Image (cartoon, helix red, strand yellow):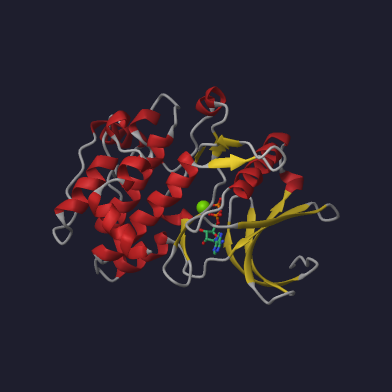
Amino acid sequence: DVLEMDGYESLESIGSGSFGLIRKVRRKADGKILARKEIDYRKMTTKEKEQLVAEVNILKDLKHPNIVQFLERVIDREHCFIYILMEYCEGGDLAAVIKRHKESSTPIPEEFIWNIMVQLIMALHECHHGTSVNEETHQVTPRPILHRDLKPDNVFLDGKHNVKLGDFGLSRSLTNPQKAFAQTYVGTPFYMSPELIGEFTYDAKSDIWSLGCVIYELCALQPPFLADTQAQLSARIKEGRVHSLPGNYTQELNQIVKWMLRVDSRKRPTTKELLNDSQIKKVQKGLE
Ligand code: ADP
Ligand code: MG
Protein backbone atom coordinates (compact mmCIF):
# COMPACT_ATOMS: atom_id res chain seq x y z
CA ASP A 1 0.00 0.00 0.00
CA VAL A 2 1.15 3.42 -0.96
CA LEU A 3 1.43 6.04 1.73
CA GLU A 4 -0.15 9.36 0.94
CA MET A 5 1.31 12.62 2.04
CA ASP A 6 -0.22 16.07 1.95
CA GLY A 7 0.88 18.12 -1.01
CA TYR A 8 2.47 15.22 -2.90
CA GLU A 9 1.18 12.66 -5.35
CA SER A 10 2.85 9.22 -4.99
CA LEU A 11 4.27 7.74 -8.19
CA GLU A 12 6.21 4.51 -8.75
CA SER A 13 8.95 3.22 -6.45
CA ILE A 14 12.44 3.65 -7.90
CA GLY A 15 14.63 1.72 -5.53
CA SER A 16 14.85 0.09 -2.19
CA GLY A 17 17.28 1.45 0.32
CA SER A 18 18.65 0.00 3.51
CA PHE A 19 16.04 1.95 5.49
CA GLY A 20 13.06 1.58 3.16
CA LEU A 21 11.65 2.47 -0.22
CA ILE A 22 12.65 5.30 -2.51
CA ARG A 23 9.64 6.60 -4.39
CA LYS A 24 9.07 9.12 -7.13
CA VAL A 25 6.56 11.79 -6.09
CA ARG A 26 5.01 14.82 -7.75
CA ARG A 27 4.80 18.06 -5.76
CA LYS A 28 1.27 19.30 -6.35
CA ALA A 29 2.17 22.96 -5.94
CA ASP A 30 4.34 23.11 -9.06
CA GLY A 31 4.27 19.61 -10.59
CA LYS A 32 7.96 19.07 -9.87
CA ILE A 33 9.13 15.44 -9.67
CA LEU A 34 11.09 14.59 -6.51
CA ALA A 35 12.48 11.47 -4.83
CA ARG A 36 11.18 10.47 -1.41
CA LYS A 37 12.94 8.12 0.99
CA GLU A 38 10.31 6.39 3.13
CA ILE A 39 11.63 5.21 6.46
CA ASP A 40 9.59 3.11 8.87
CA TYR A 41 11.00 4.11 12.25
CA ARG A 42 9.09 1.54 14.30
CA LYS A 43 11.70 -1.12 13.55
CA MET A 44 14.58 1.21 14.34
CA THR A 45 16.66 1.15 17.50
CA THR A 46 17.36 4.38 19.39
CA LYS A 47 20.86 4.35 17.97
CA GLU A 48 19.57 4.02 14.41
CA LYS A 49 17.13 6.86 14.96
CA GLU A 50 19.96 9.04 16.24
CA GLN A 51 22.01 8.11 13.18
CA LEU A 52 19.13 9.00 10.89
CA VAL A 53 18.66 12.40 12.52
CA ALA A 54 22.40 12.97 12.14
CA GLU A 55 22.20 12.00 8.44
CA VAL A 56 19.37 14.42 7.81
CA ASN A 57 21.24 17.21 9.56
CA ILE A 58 24.30 16.55 7.41
CA LEU A 59 22.22 16.58 4.22
CA LYS A 60 20.48 19.82 5.17
CA ASP A 61 23.86 21.51 5.43
CA LEU A 62 25.17 20.28 2.10
CA LYS A 63 24.32 22.44 -0.88
CA HIS A 64 26.30 21.82 -4.04
CA PRO A 65 25.40 21.24 -7.70
CA ASN A 66 27.10 17.81 -7.56
CA ILE A 67 25.43 16.59 -4.38
CA VAL A 68 21.85 15.27 -4.30
CA GLN A 69 19.89 18.16 -2.84
CA PHE A 70 17.96 17.51 0.35
CA LEU A 71 14.67 19.41 0.33
CA GLU A 72 12.51 18.53 3.28
CA ARG A 73 11.98 16.10 6.12
CA VAL A 74 8.47 15.16 7.20
CA ILE A 75 7.54 13.03 10.20
CA ASP A 76 4.28 11.07 9.97
CA ARG A 77 3.66 10.10 13.60
CA GLU A 78 0.41 8.31 12.79
CA HIS A 79 2.11 5.73 10.52
CA CYS A 80 5.56 6.00 12.17
CA PHE A 81 7.24 7.08 8.94
CA ILE A 82 9.93 9.62 8.26
CA TYR A 83 10.00 10.99 4.72
CA ILE A 84 13.07 12.58 3.24
CA LEU A 85 12.36 14.58 0.13
CA MET A 86 15.20 15.18 -2.23
CA GLU A 87 16.12 16.09 -5.76
CA TYR A 88 15.20 13.33 -8.25
CA CYS A 89 18.00 12.04 -10.47
CA GLU A 90 16.43 10.64 -13.61
CA GLY A 91 19.68 9.36 -15.16
CA GLY A 92 20.06 6.42 -12.75
CA ASP A 93 23.29 5.47 -11.06
CA LEU A 94 26.82 4.69 -12.25
CA ALA A 95 26.45 1.00 -11.36
CA ALA A 96 23.83 0.76 -14.12
CA VAL A 97 26.12 2.59 -16.59
CA ILE A 98 28.93 0.12 -15.82
CA LYS A 99 26.57 -2.85 -16.15
CA ARG A 100 25.30 -1.68 -19.55
CA HIS A 101 28.80 -1.25 -20.93
CA LYS A 102 29.94 -4.57 -19.48
CA GLU A 103 27.04 -6.41 -21.08
CA SER A 104 27.65 -4.85 -24.48
CA SER A 105 31.47 -5.06 -24.12
CA THR A 106 31.87 -1.42 -25.10
CA PRO A 107 34.26 0.88 -23.23
CA ILE A 108 32.95 4.02 -21.55
CA PRO A 109 34.33 7.04 -23.46
CA GLU A 110 37.29 8.67 -21.71
CA GLU A 111 35.78 12.15 -21.96
CA PHE A 112 32.70 11.01 -20.02
CA ILE A 113 34.96 9.48 -17.33
CA TRP A 114 36.94 12.73 -16.90
CA ASN A 115 33.69 14.65 -16.56
CA ILE A 116 32.42 12.25 -13.90
CA MET A 117 35.73 12.35 -12.04
CA VAL A 118 35.97 16.11 -11.94
CA GLN A 119 32.38 16.49 -10.72
CA LEU A 120 32.96 13.88 -8.00
CA ILE A 121 36.14 15.68 -6.92
CA MET A 122 34.14 18.91 -6.62
CA ALA A 123 31.43 17.12 -4.60
CA LEU A 124 34.02 15.59 -2.27
CA HIS A 125 35.80 18.92 -1.99
CA GLU A 126 32.59 20.47 -0.71
CA CYS A 127 32.25 17.62 1.81
CA HIS A 128 35.85 17.65 2.99
CA HIS A 129 36.57 21.36 2.98
CA GLY A 130 33.17 23.02 3.15
CA THR A 131 32.03 25.36 5.91
CA SER A 132 28.73 25.98 7.59
CA VAL A 133 27.31 29.31 8.62
CA ASN A 134 25.40 29.64 11.89
CA GLU A 135 22.09 31.29 11.05
CA GLU A 136 21.97 33.37 14.22
CA THR A 137 25.58 34.36 14.82
CA HIS A 138 26.67 34.20 11.14
CA GLN A 139 29.79 32.49 12.37
CA VAL A 140 31.56 30.40 9.73
CA THR A 141 32.95 27.09 10.93
CA PRO A 142 34.59 24.24 9.02
CA ARG A 143 32.45 21.11 8.94
CA PRO A 144 34.37 18.30 7.34
CA ILE A 145 32.07 15.51 6.23
CA LEU A 146 33.19 12.12 5.01
CA HIS A 147 31.05 10.22 2.57
CA ARG A 148 32.26 6.76 3.68
CA ASP A 149 30.35 4.77 1.08
CA LEU A 150 31.42 6.15 -2.26
CA LYS A 151 30.68 3.50 -4.89
CA PRO A 152 28.98 3.39 -8.31
CA ASP A 153 25.53 2.67 -6.77
CA ASN A 154 25.67 5.91 -4.81
CA VAL A 155 26.60 8.21 -7.68
CA PHE A 156 23.54 9.42 -9.55
CA LEU A 157 23.05 11.23 -12.85
CA ASP A 158 20.41 13.82 -13.61
CA GLY A 159 18.80 14.27 -17.02
CA LYS A 160 21.72 16.33 -18.31
CA HIS A 161 24.59 13.98 -17.40
CA ASN A 162 25.36 16.02 -14.30
CA VAL A 163 26.80 13.92 -11.52
CA LYS A 164 25.12 13.93 -8.11
CA LEU A 165 26.77 12.29 -5.14
CA GLY A 166 24.07 10.73 -2.98
CA ASP A 167 23.27 8.27 -0.22
CA PHE A 168 24.99 9.86 2.74
CA GLY A 169 23.56 7.12 4.95
CA LEU A 170 26.90 6.27 6.42
CA SER A 171 28.58 9.63 6.33
CA ARG A 172 29.38 11.28 9.60
CA SER A 173 30.44 14.74 10.41
CA LEU A 174 34.00 14.96 11.61
CA THR A 175 33.50 17.74 14.14
CA ASN A 176 34.44 15.19 16.76
CA PRO A 177 37.40 13.39 15.14
CA GLN A 178 38.01 10.96 18.00
CA LYS A 179 34.44 9.80 17.88
CA ALA A 180 34.43 9.61 14.08
CA PHE A 181 37.62 7.56 14.06
CA ALA A 182 36.19 5.16 16.59
CA GLN A 183 33.23 4.37 14.41
CA THR A 184 33.31 1.00 12.70
CA TYR A 185 33.60 0.75 8.97
CA VAL A 186 30.53 -0.73 7.26
CA GLY A 187 31.11 -0.13 3.55
CA THR A 188 31.62 -2.31 0.47
CA PRO A 189 34.63 -4.61 0.93
CA PHE A 190 35.81 -4.25 -2.71
CA TYR A 191 36.49 -0.57 -2.14
CA MET A 192 37.88 -0.85 1.38
CA SER A 193 41.09 1.16 1.69
CA PRO A 194 44.32 -0.33 3.06
CA GLU A 195 44.27 1.78 6.22
CA LEU A 196 40.90 0.32 7.13
CA ILE A 197 42.05 -3.26 7.17
CA GLY A 198 42.25 -4.20 10.80
CA GLU A 199 42.41 -0.65 12.06
CA PHE A 200 39.04 1.02 11.60
CA THR A 201 40.35 4.46 10.91
CA TYR A 202 38.69 6.49 8.23
CA ASP A 203 39.57 9.93 7.01
CA ALA A 204 39.17 12.09 3.91
CA LYS A 205 41.92 10.11 2.15
CA SER A 206 39.79 6.97 2.42
CA ASP A 207 37.09 8.72 0.36
CA ILE A 208 39.83 9.53 -2.19
CA TRP A 209 40.73 5.83 -2.34
CA SER A 210 37.09 4.97 -3.04
CA LEU A 211 36.98 7.60 -5.76
CA GLY A 212 40.05 5.97 -7.33
CA CYS A 213 38.19 2.64 -7.24
CA VAL A 214 35.09 4.16 -8.89
CA ILE A 215 37.11 5.74 -11.71
CA TYR A 216 39.11 2.54 -12.17
CA GLU A 217 35.90 0.52 -12.46
CA LEU A 218 34.44 2.95 -15.02
CA CYS A 219 37.49 2.29 -17.21
CA ALA A 220 38.11 -1.42 -16.60
CA LEU A 221 34.44 -2.34 -16.02
CA GLN A 222 35.57 -4.24 -12.92
CA PRO A 223 36.94 -3.12 -9.53
CA PRO A 224 40.73 -2.71 -9.15
CA PHE A 225 40.97 -5.43 -6.51
CA LEU A 226 39.12 -8.71 -6.83
CA ALA A 227 39.30 -11.87 -4.75
CA ASP A 228 37.21 -14.83 -3.71
CA THR A 229 37.68 -14.41 0.00
CA GLN A 230 37.78 -11.42 2.34
CA ALA A 231 41.28 -12.42 3.53
CA GLN A 232 42.62 -12.59 -0.02
CA LEU A 233 40.99 -9.27 -0.85
CA SER A 234 42.57 -7.60 2.19
CA ALA A 235 45.97 -8.96 1.19
CA ARG A 236 45.62 -7.66 -2.39
CA ILE A 237 44.50 -4.22 -1.25
CA LYS A 238 47.38 -3.88 1.21
CA GLU A 239 49.82 -4.99 -1.47
CA GLY A 240 48.31 -2.34 -3.73
CA ARG A 241 49.31 -3.71 -7.11
CA VAL A 242 46.90 -2.31 -9.68
CA HIS A 243 46.76 -3.33 -13.33
CA SER A 244 47.01 -0.51 -15.85
CA LEU A 245 43.73 0.66 -17.34
CA PRO A 246 42.71 -0.91 -20.68
CA GLY A 247 44.87 0.33 -23.56
CA ASN A 248 42.32 2.77 -24.94
CA TYR A 249 42.75 5.12 -21.93
CA THR A 250 45.47 7.79 -21.74
CA GLN A 251 48.56 7.89 -19.55
CA GLU A 252 47.17 10.99 -17.79
CA LEU A 253 44.10 9.13 -16.63
CA ASN A 254 46.22 6.14 -15.55
CA GLN A 255 48.43 8.42 -13.48
CA ILE A 256 45.58 10.12 -11.64
CA VAL A 257 43.90 6.80 -10.82
CA LYS A 258 47.19 5.37 -9.51
CA TRP A 259 47.71 8.53 -7.41
CA MET A 260 44.31 8.06 -5.74
CA LEU A 261 45.10 4.37 -5.18
CA ARG A 262 48.39 4.84 -3.32
CA VAL A 263 48.50 2.38 -0.41
CA ASP A 264 50.11 5.01 1.84
CA SER A 265 47.21 7.42 2.43
CA ARG A 266 49.62 10.34 2.98
CA LYS A 267 50.75 9.99 -0.62
CA ARG A 268 47.21 10.13 -1.98
CA PRO A 269 46.03 13.56 -3.17
CA THR A 270 43.59 15.76 -1.28
CA THR A 271 40.71 17.25 -3.27
CA LYS A 272 42.69 20.51 -3.25
CA GLU A 273 45.68 18.87 -4.89
CA LEU A 274 43.46 17.19 -7.45
CA LEU A 275 41.76 20.48 -8.32
CA ASN A 276 45.23 21.96 -8.90
CA ASP A 277 46.13 19.33 -11.48
CA SER A 278 46.42 20.94 -14.92
CA GLN A 279 44.41 18.25 -16.75
CA ILE A 280 41.63 18.42 -14.14
CA LYS A 281 41.58 22.21 -14.37
CA LYS A 282 41.12 21.92 -18.13
CA VAL A 283 38.14 19.56 -17.76
CA GLN A 284 36.68 21.81 -15.05
CA LYS A 285 36.86 24.80 -17.40
CA GLY A 286 35.03 22.81 -20.06
CA LEU A 287 32.19 22.03 -17.65
CA GLU A 288 31.53 25.68 -16.77
P1 ADP B 1 20.81 2.83 0.39
O1 ADP B 1 21.26 3.53 1.61
O2 ADP B 1 19.99 1.69 0.77
O3 ADP B 1 21.91 2.40 -0.53
P2 ADP B 1 20.18 4.86 -1.60
O4 ADP B 1 19.99 6.26 -1.13
O5 ADP B 1 21.49 4.55 -2.25
O6 ADP B 1 19.87 3.87 -0.39
O7 ADP B 1 18.99 4.53 -2.61
C1 ADP B 1 18.82 3.24 -3.16
C2 ADP B 1 18.56 3.34 -4.68
O8 ADP B 1 17.41 4.16 -4.95
C3 ADP B 1 19.70 4.00 -5.45
O9 ADP B 1 20.72 3.11 -5.82
C4 ADP B 1 18.97 4.59 -6.66
O10 ADP B 1 18.78 3.61 -7.66
C5 ADP B 1 17.61 5.00 -6.07
N1 ADP B 1 17.65 6.42 -5.64
C6 ADP B 1 17.97 6.90 -4.40
N2 ADP B 1 17.90 8.23 -4.34
C7 ADP B 1 17.54 8.65 -5.58
C8 ADP B 1 17.29 9.96 -6.18
N3 ADP B 1 17.42 11.09 -5.47
N4 ADP B 1 16.93 9.99 -7.48
C9 ADP B 1 16.81 8.84 -8.20
N5 ADP B 1 17.02 7.61 -7.71
C10 ADP B 1 17.38 7.49 -6.41
MG1 MG C 1 23.08 3.27 -1.81
Rendered view: 198 above or below 132: above
| Relative horizontal placement of residue 237, taking residue 210 as reference (left or right) | left
Name, please, the residue furthest toward the bottom: 31
Q: Residue at horizontal 36%, vertical 59%?
A: 116
Q: Is residue 151 above or below residue 163?
A: above
For residue 141, what is the image quadrant? top right
Residue beneath the point at 23% across and 53% down: 279
Along the line of sight, the residue nearer the viewer: 22 or 67 = 67
Q: Nearer the viewer, residue 72 or 18?
A: 72
- Residue beneath the point at 50% across and 37% down: 186
Q: Is residue 190 visible?
A: no
User: Where residue 20 appears, x then y in whole percent?
Assistant: 64, 55
Residue 240 x, y percent position in the rendering: 24, 35
Question: At which x and y percent is residue 265?
Answer: 32, 31
**How far across and down, in percent of the image, does residue 104 sit?**
28, 71
**Residue at point 72%, 40% (across, down):** 136
Extreme right residue here? 78
Q: Is residue 235 above or below residue 19?
A: above
| Residue 173 to residue 282: above or below | above
